[in-house]
Amino acid sequence: MRDRRLLIGSLALVVAASGFGMLGPVARLAYDAGFEPMAFVAWRATIGWLAIVAIVALTNRRGDALVNPFRLPRRDVLALIVAGGAGIALNISTFVAFDLTTVALVLLAFYTYPALVAVVAVALGHERLDGSRLVALGLALGGMVLVVAGGLDPSTVARDGGASFNPVGVVLGLVAAIFQTVFVTINRGRFATMPSVQVMSWVLLMMIAVCIPLAFVLGNRLDVPLHDGRALGLALLAGIFGAGVPSVLFLIGIRAIGGTRAGILMLIEPLVGVTLAAIVLHEALLPIQVVGGAAILGAALLLQRGGPGDRPEPGLVAVAEHT
């Protein structure tokens, strides 16, 4: 059972990281098709939510009961609201940070969150860091730095017309990392009676309720996909495979193998993003990035070793395997 849980959780996270990782290149293509950033976020959340609703309907027909969130224990209701708020704040912080400084610097700040997740998990007594997990965390973080740092191309910075370093943008990247840590920590230990797919349906619904009005306030056009088939296709791609499906798999992975392992495996995300950028956008893939990618993959393999570090809460394994 333990090996099965580890395998299910790891595979779920690898697929989730791949889905999230494609968003950078897809967003770049979407902006070229006429999208503005907040409108793109709103469409992504809306389509992702519709995809999750379809999954919920399918699982309900197969016998999974719908859980009324207002009948959850009061602490779980509060945790669900906090998780939704963390997801919203994470997206807004990242969006503003990308507007202020280079994407690579924001990613370097944001992907400190696996280390933050590990510290919080140990502090709360959810997990303990054994030797193999510490080595995997170090390998993954080091590999991420190499992968992302390879994108700090001075010529790209010059073309973007901005400085290579803006402290506010970097701070917002760190703020996003904190909100991601909150999201991971809450979803690891709460909602044991609510399937992951239903949790994410409520989180994305809260995101829609904030992002659509915000897009209006910022003057972002929301009708672009209605007039451009390419924009609609990119929105569908980002919503289904970059929001709905990977968000659910992300929660399944957290519940199955714990926050620390999940955070480390999610460092595959920038590796996927950089590789897709090289293929789709014809951006150069530097040797230093290949080395970094190998380190991340090495960490992922190391994590498949069993260990006594996780103590999952009752019911989470069953929920993960049936979602």
Image (tube, grey):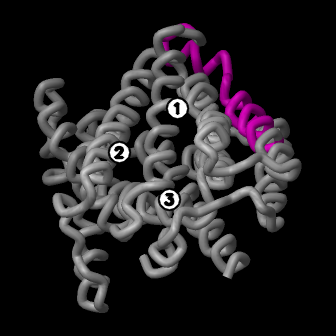
Q: Looking at the picture, which amino acid does disc 2 mark?
A: Ala
Q: Which residues are magenta?
A: 139-163
Tell me the SS state at disc 1: helix
Please provide percent x and percent y for residue 267: 65, 46
Could you say which disc has been placed on residue 83 in the image? 2
183 left or right of 12 in image: left
Residue 257 seen in render: yes
- The crowding category of the residue bearing disc 3, from other C-alpha atoms within 10 Å (few below 14, some 14 to 19, many at least 20), is many
159 left or right of 95 in image: right
Please provide percent x and percent y for residue 87: 36, 41
Q: Residue at x 53, y 8 (%)?
A: 167
Tell me the SS state at disc 3: helix
Work out how far the residue at label 2 is from the one at label 3, CA to CA, in angstroms: 13 Å
Q: Earlier in the sequence, mark 2 or mark 3?
A: 2
Q: Is residue 144 magenta?
A: yes
Q: Residue at x 61, y 57 (%)?
A: 258
Q: Which residue is mark 1?
A: 177
- The crowding category of the residue bearing disc 2, from other C-alpha atoms within 10 Å (few below 14, some 14 to 19, many at least 20), is many
Residue furthest to the bottom in view is 62
Front residue of this view, candidates 129 and 12: 129
Q: Which residue is mark 3?
A: 250
The quadrant of the rendering that contains the C terminus is bottom left
Could you say which disc has been placed on residue 120 in the image? none
Please provide percent x and percent y for residue 7: 68, 74
- The crowding category of the residue bearing disc 1, from other C-alpha atoms within 10 Å (few below 14, some 14 to 19, many at least 20), is many
The quadrant of the rendering that contains the N terminus is bottom right
Corner quadrant of residue 123: top right
Q: Residue at x 77, y 34 (%)?
A: 146
Q: Tell me: residue 118, above or below residue 168.
A: below
Q: Looking at the picture, which amino acid does disc 3 mark?
A: Phe
Work out how far the residue at label 1 is from the one at label 3, CA to CA, in angstroms: 16 Å
Q: Earlier in the sequence, mark 1 or mark 3?
A: 1
